[in-house]
Structures are given as C-alpha cells and as structure tokens.
C-alpha cells in the first residue's frame, strides 16, 4: 500500500523505524509530473531495496528562472496513481515552508563541475539541487538513491556532494528513457508547442550523428562539436546554449574524445529548454 506523507518529521520517524528493523531504503527524488523515465528509476529501486520512497517536491530554490518555476507542470493525483501501480511504498510530499523554513540562512555551495555547462546558464541551480537532495537524505536516510543520466551533470554533482559530505548513500545512475522518436522524456516536454515537439528529436539526432562520426574515426572534440552544430542548425528557431564534448567526471571540454567522454547538449525551443547527453561510445 502506498503511504503518502506531507509532514517531514513524521516521515523522519517512519524511516528511522524502518532502518531499525533492518529494511533497506531506496529513494527516488523527483519534482513530479511523472513519466516513464521516473518509473524506470522506481523499477530499479524496487529491484534493490525493501522499501521504495519517492519524493515529489518542486524545489523553488533550484529554479533560476521564475517563469520556468511558475510554469513547471504539476499533476499530483496522476503522479500518485502512477507510483501506486509501480509498487512504490512511500511518497513524501513536503510543503515549501517545511522543506525550506524562512529565513533560509543555510545553502550548500557547489563549485567545480557544477560551475560548467548548466552552471553557466542556470546560476545557482546546483546549489539549490545539492541543498534539497542533502535535506531529503537527512529526512529519509536512504541507503541508495536513484538519479537519471538524463540530468548527467546533476548526477555528477550529487555524487561529488555525497562523497564530500560523507553521506552514507550509494548513488545509482539510471539510463535515459526516450520517446519512440528519440526525444528524452522530460516533464518540460509537455510545454512544447506541436511545432516545437516535432523539432525536438533533433537534439538526440545531433548526439547520434556525433556518435556515428566518432565510430567512423572522428576523435577530436572540435570535430564532434561541429557535427552536432551542423545537425542542430538544420532546424529553424532553435537556440543552442551549448553542444560540447566533456570529461565524464570534471565536465571540462576534451580535445580528444574517448568512449566514455560525454556529448552534452542544451537548447531552447520557444520558451522550453531541453537538455540531453550520451557517452561518445554509446550508452
Ligand atoms: P525531475 O522530476 O525532472 O527532477 O527528475 C527526477 C529524476 O528523474 C532525476 O534523477 C532525473 O534525472 C530522472 N529523469 C528525468 N527524466 C528522465 C528520463 N527521461 N530517463 C531517465 N531518468 C529521468
């Protein structure tokens, strides 16, 4: 049976008991508006943990753009139905006031890999992510936490935070789930106009073209970037934030790509920002 709890302290007590009983806890942090990508994380958690917890919290402090926050889709009823049928045990639905009590004087500061790519275009984003993820770990005390490779930089930043703050949590990265046309599933896809939705698979096609070029012998970072730009510029009214080839740990640009180097892309289609990535050697 799915148990839904809003109160953070109640959740904290419940999970303390579960851990005392020796039950392993897996956490899937989300911002709701759930889709098959989220469900795939739940399925992986189900395989490895006795108790699967999902948090649904649209974390205002990780949005650098007020409109993006305001327009972020919310569908709690449908989310809970999806989680119940995916076999989730526990959903934490905290309020803003309880999660981030005011005045908010404590924030985790991230740097290094967090300052590149998304960090350039969304200043403060990863400080907000790191802070809420740390709070969720403190509230629920999971032994494992599941994050999607869809947000590859987030995965890198969270792993770094866990290591530096000595959280006793194993971070499990999970592959990106895509629509049949290759578009990475995302809650923000709902906000694409019909015309932009038709253009959106170009992001994955650009990544695939770079992967093919690498397989055919193009190993220079510049060459692979040029391939991605060429594909992306075949679509009108698409604004590129970045299309890069980076080291999978530091996220710094690489001159010579290796199979585990990461192709990372961020674009705007209308008011919607899309990100995607893949290993150069394929996922
Ligand atoms: P979000 O609700 O967008 O914050 O995402 C919650 C978690 O789901 C994050 O760890 C995301 O990386 C992951 N996620 C989102 N979309 C996908 C996807 N298409 N495939 C796999 N994981 C995803």
Image: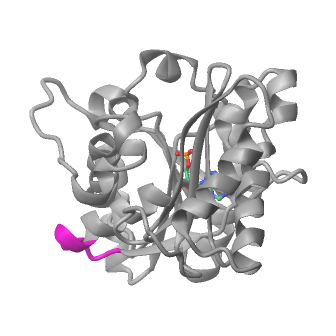
Say if residue 89 shows up in the picture.
Answer: no
Say if residue 143 shows up in the picture.
Answer: yes
Which quadrant, please, contains the C terminus? bottom right
Q: Which residues are magenta?
A: 163-169
Image quadrant of residue 219?
bottom right
Task: Give how far across and how far down residue 34 sits, in percent.
Answer: 67, 43
Task: Give how far across and how far down residue 65 sits, in percent.
Answer: 42, 22
Reply yes or no: does residue 165 show up in magenta: yes
Q: Nearer the viewer, residue 248 or 65?
A: 248
Which quadrant, please, contains the N terminus? bottom right
Image quadrant of residue 211?
bottom right
Q: Nearer the viewer, residue 214 or 251?
A: 214
**Magenta stretch: dominant secondary structure:** loop
User: Given the current orientation, which residue lies at the most extreme left position?
Assistant: 105
Task: Give how far across and how far down residue 150 sits, in percent.
Answer: 60, 56
Task: Give how far across and how far down residue 184 sits, in percent.
Answer: 72, 51
Tell me which residue sits at (63%, 72%) in the image: 280
Reply yes or no: does residue 69 show up in magenta: no
Task: Decide: is 254 above or below 7.
Answer: below
Tell me which residue sits at (29%, 48%) in the image: 115
Tell me which residue sits at (65%, 33%) in the image: 188
Tell me which residue sits at (35%, 39%) in the image: 120
């Amino acid at each position: 049976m799915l148990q839904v709890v809003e109160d953070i302290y109640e959740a904290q007590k419940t999970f303390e008991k579960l851990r005392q009983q020796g039950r392993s806890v897996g956490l899937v942090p989300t911002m709701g508006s759930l889709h098959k990508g989220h469900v795939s994380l739940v399925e992986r958690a189900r395989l490895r943990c006795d108790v699967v917890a999902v948090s649904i919290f649209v974390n205002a402090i990780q949005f650098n753009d007020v409109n993006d926050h305001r327009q972020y889709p919310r569908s709690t009823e449908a989310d809970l139905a999806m989680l119940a049928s995916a076999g989730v045990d526990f959903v934490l639905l905290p309020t803003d006031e309880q999660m981030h009590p005011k005045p908010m004087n404590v924030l985790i500061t991230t740097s290094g890999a967090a300052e590149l790519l998304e960090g350039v275009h969304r200043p403060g984003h990863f400080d907000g992510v790191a802070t809420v993820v740390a709070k969720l770990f403190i509230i629920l005390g999971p032994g494992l936490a599941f994050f999607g490779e869809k947000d590859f930089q987030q995965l890198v930043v969270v792993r770094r935070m866990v290591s530096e703050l000595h959280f006793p949590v194993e971070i499990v990265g999970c592959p990106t789930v895509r629509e049949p046309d290759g578009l990475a599933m995302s809650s923000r896809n709902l906000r694409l106009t019909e015309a932009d939705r038709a253009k959106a698979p170009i992001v994955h096609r650009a990544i695939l073209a770079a992967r093919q070029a690498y397989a055919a012998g193009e190993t220079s970072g510049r060459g692979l970037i040029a391939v991605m730009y060429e594909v992306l510029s075949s679509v009108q009214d698409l604004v590129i934030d970045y299309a890069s080839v980076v080291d999978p740990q530091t996220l710094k640009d690489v001159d010579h790509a290796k199979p585990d180097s990461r192709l990372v892309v961020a674009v705007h289609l209308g008011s919607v920002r899309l990100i995607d990535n893949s290993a150069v050697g394929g996922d």
